Structure formats: structure tokens, C-alpha cells
Image (cartoon, helix red, strand yellow):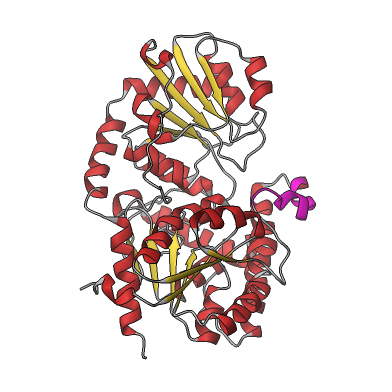
Amino acid sequence: MISSIEQLAGKKVLFATISTDAHIDPLTGLAKYLQDCGCDVRWYASKYYTAKFHELYIYHYTHRQHKDVHGENVDEIHPERTRITDRVAKLNYDMTNILAKPAVKHFEDIRHIYEVFPFDILIVDNMFTAAPIVRKILGVPVIAIGVIPLTEASRDLPPYGLGMTPSHHPLGRLRQAILRFLTDKILFKQSYKAYEQVFRKYGISTKGVNMLDSIVKHADLVLQIGTPGLEYQRRDMGSNIRYIGALLPYSTGKKGIPWFDERLQQYRKVVLVTQGRTEKDVSKIIIPALEAFRDTNVLTIVTTGGSHTAALRALYPYRNVIIEDYIPFNEVMPYADAFITNGGYGGVLLSLKNRLPIIAAGTDECKNETCARIGYMKYGINLHTESPGADQISEAFDKILDTPLYKTNISRLMEEFNQYDPIPLSAGYVADLLMKRPA
């Protein structure tokens, strides 16, 4: 039974995350809730986010020893990654240089924070590689929040990161086992070795598992955003994993004038297109989508995240095209028939909550794992590429409109989601874990 959140008053809580919107934003609602429960909540992340935390009234610790890498400058700090064209090689580079090696400096920063702010619990996103070291060396309980699909390895699944779907056929299962071995020992050997060296520096064992699995297995609890219906079935799921539903970013609840355009009432077919904020190359999804629907009877709404908005408006001055830097998804998704995305987990969750089928086109930064689940579970269509053609997008949209199964499956999933109250549930797990900690 989850302990009362009344036990949280006076507790010191440190959040520490990878410095991108996708890893910070989903945790902000929980952070503010814990603050309202009387916790002293602070956050460790790039100074790039100082203004965000100031607006949230959350004390912010910045990187001291580690290069101040965040989602907007990662290619500037690591220019060599822009020259890597092979998807596996790029993922291996990122896991080595952005996740594994920085763990030491992140931990040393956090150890310094602990000297002045002896936090009772550390809450991280499930890619924050210093978390197991904090738990081992400082003896502080750790909760990892799954801001991407569940990263835990399983004998029932293919290796994580390749965007493959599971097979239940004996030959398919054998192939998956071989691929898991090859992935750990060959494909991602560089990054996993780098993380093993970090662990050895602090006298910690990786327990014979890879980097992403180590973060899961060394956490006291993993609070996975989503529900069982959004995840592959596995018989060996860790006993420390809990589903928490759609944990979404903090909202002040203030209601201003909602976004609206009169064309929403003039078109029978509406599609919403985004690449998120971090993907700046609009030729990947946005331009193919605009080419697919320009000057048609489909109202095409594009959010650019601030990338090339004016230039795109000049190139596509059609009445059926709306191009904005940003539109609150909850205000536009109820009008749409499909959501075209590169697989950002937060956007996908919002799309599902609005019972909106998805056309997914993403392969980088583990977005292929989200896209794979969308296609496998028939919540939409996975195009298996990050650079789809206009014809692919148009055909997928027509199929979405002609196939009621997608909306039926999403409606069933939402019945499952409605059984979870994510923020109080998560806070209850925090309280429960702290109650078990020796005084």
C-alpha cells in the first residue's frame, strides 16, 4: 500500500536529468506537486534551463565540472557527431560521449550538491547515467522515471535501440537472442565498455548488463510513463518497475484565449505535423508533409519549434496550410485526424490522450523504439524512416482515414490510461520509498 503523501513534508528532493526538454518537461508536474506537499525541491541541469526553473520557483544547480551540453548545443559541443551518417554508429557515439563518459562529472557535481543540500531522494530520468553511482556512494534512494519506452532488456524482446518489434516464433526468438549478444558485445561495445569503466572507478558492478539496463536495475524504483498497453509484453520485467500513466509537464492551469483558426471549421480533413524542437532539419518530415498536402482539401497544421517558420510560410502560401512556431497540442489535436511526428514520447502521449492516430517517422535518439511500438500495437503507422517521401505520408494518411481499427485500439488504450492518476500516484511511490529508508 502506498504511503500517505503527508509523509513528504520537509523532505529534500533533488531532480537530475539529461538537459533536453523531452527529459525535463515530463518531470516538472511531479516536482511542483512534491513542492506543494512541503518538499524542498531542487534540480540539477544545464544553465540553459535557468529561466525555466526560475519560472517554476525551483532552485537550480548547474553543471560545474561537465561541459554545459543541452539539446540546443549538442552538435556545437560535439561537431564530429554531425558527420556520422550510420544510425547505429551515431547512437553508439551518443551513448559513449553524451551518456556514459559524463557520468563521472555529473556524479562529482551531485556529490558537491549533497554536501550543502543533503537530499533524501534523487529523482532522475531513465537516461541519467550518474544515478547508480549516487545510490551506491551516497546511499541515497533513487527513482528513475521512464521518459522513453521501457529500456529494460528482456529475453522476450530484441535489443533496445534498433527499433525492432518482438517475435514469438522459435526462430525469431533465437534471432533476438543472437542480436542481443551482438548488440552488447559488438555494436555498442564502445559505449558499454566506457560505462563499465565508470562503474569500476567507484567499485560498482554492472551486474553483467548493458548501460541502459544498468540504470534500471540499480534504481530503487522505475516509474515508467505509460501503461502496459503501450509496452511490449515480457515475462521477466523487473520487480522495481511501476507504470504511472501519462505523466505530463506542469501546467499553471491558467486559461488564456485558446488557439483557434477559422479554417478548422472549413476543412473536413485535418493533419497535424511536428518534428519537435530539437530536430532543425525541416526537410525530414515537415517539407515532405507540406508537399503531400499542399493546395489540397486537407488542412495541414505545422508546428516548427521555431525552425525556419518564415521561410516555410513563404514557400507554402496555400490556404490549407498553417505554419506556426508553436501551438498548444491539446488545443489543436481535438480537430485533427492524424498526427505526423518523429516519435517524441511526450507528443505521442498527447496524441493518444486525444485519441488521435499517429503517422510515425523517426529513427534517431531511440525514437525508433516509440515508432516501433506505435506500428506494432496498431495505434498508427510506422514509416520506418526519419525522411519519408510525400507519397509515403499521403498514403499513410489515407490508410489512417480508411481504417477504424487505429482509433478503436487507441480508445481501448485510453480506458487503461484512465485508471492511472500519474502525479499523485508517483508522489505516493516517493513517499513509500522514503518511509522505508532508515532514519
Q: Residue drawn 66% across and 15% down? A: 315
For residue 39, side relative to residue 131 (left or right): left
- List x then y, in percent, for residue 279: 62, 40
- List x then y, in percent, for residue 264: 40, 17
Q: Is residue 32 magenta?
A: no
Does residue 150 appear anywhere in the picture?
yes
Range of the magenta residues?
A: 71-82
Q: Is residue 77 magenta?
A: yes
Which quadrant does the N terminus fall into?
bottom left
Q: Can you tell which quarter of the image residue 373 is in? A: top left
- List x then y, in percent, for residue 227: 31, 53
Q: Main secondary structure of the magenta part?
A: helix
Which quadrant does the C terminus fall into?
bottom left
Q: Residue drawn 37% across and 53% down? A: 247
Does residue 206 appear anywhere in the picture?
no
Q: Disc count in the image?
A: 0
- Which is nearer the eye, 212 or 223? 223
Residue 141, relative to residue 167: is it above or below? below
Residue 264, relative to residue 367: is it above or below? above
Q: Residue drawn 63% across and 62% down? A: 188
- Which is nearer the eye, 23 or 406? 23
Residue 265, relative to residue 218: is it above or below? above
**In the displayed image of the protein, which residue is found farthest to the bottom?**
439
For residue 223, side relative to residue 87 (left or right): left
- List x then y, in percent, for residue 58: 51, 62
